[in-house]
Amino acid sequence: MEKGFTLIELLVVVLIIGILSAVAMPQYTRAVEKSRATQAMTLVKSIADAQKIYYMANGTYARNFEDLDISMPGNPTGSTFSNGHFTYEVLHPEMIRPFVVGRYIKNGNFTWRINYYLDTEKLVCAAPVSDAEANNLCKSFSTTVVPCVSSDYTCYAL
């Protein structure tokens, strides 16, 4: 009796591993995206809390990170900073409604974003209307659609 595996047995094992990885990879990718969104929510909420404290003390919102009493990774200066896959703005310039924003950058482009509206104290996940992947990510947190600042985005309450 010879020891070892036959070619058919090895091919079956490789086929099973291939099928399992094809099923697991999309799930893994979604889990990574969702954890990034959770990280952005935490940081945006912290920036918004610092903005509320600044507003109570000064009657206006801060325009720069240096004005806020918050410790951020990399000690950002100015009104925006990038950290890995994200760009954060201390106060978005569209002053229709003042909000703090954390934008996710994928392949050099902005995709979904986390907004905290300072006037209503609401946190939302905003996805471009045309981006099904971003909408699915936001829907994984909430299916409640709320008004957005821009009609190019669909906003989901968090």
Image: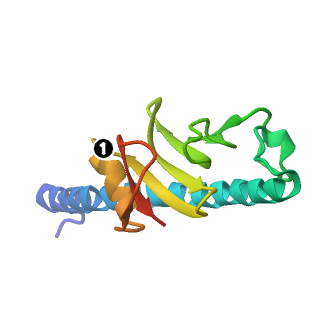
Instruction: Note whether 2 is above or below 88 in the view shown.
Output: below
- What amino acid is found at the position of numbered circle 1 in the picture? Asp
The percent position of residue 57, horizontal first and vertical second, equals 88, 56
Q: Nearer the viewer, residue 10 or 42?
A: 42
Instruction: Note whether 89 is above or below 56 in the view shown.
Output: above
Q: Is residue 18 left or right of residue 114?
A: left
The percent position of residue 10, horizontal first and vertical second, equals 20, 58
Q: Is residue 36 left or right of residue 18?
A: right
Q: Quadrant of residue 129?
A: top left
The residue under label 1 is 131
Q: Can see residue 32?
A: no
Q: Residues within 10 Å of mark 1 (few under 14, many from 20)?
A: few
The percent position of residue 14, horizontal first and vertical second, equals 22, 56
The percent position of residue 2, horizontal first and vertical second, equals 19, 65
Q: Which image quadrant: the N terminus?
A: bottom left
Which residue reaches farthest left? 8
Q: Quadrant of residue 4?
A: bottom left
Q: Nearer the viewer, residue 19 or 64?
A: 64
Q: Nearer the viewer, residue 64 or 28?
A: 64
Q: Is residue 129 left or right of residue 55?
A: left
Q: Is residue 71 left or right of residue 134?
A: right
Q: Can see residue 106?
A: yes
| Mark 1: secondary structure | loop
Q: How is the image coloured?
A: rainbow
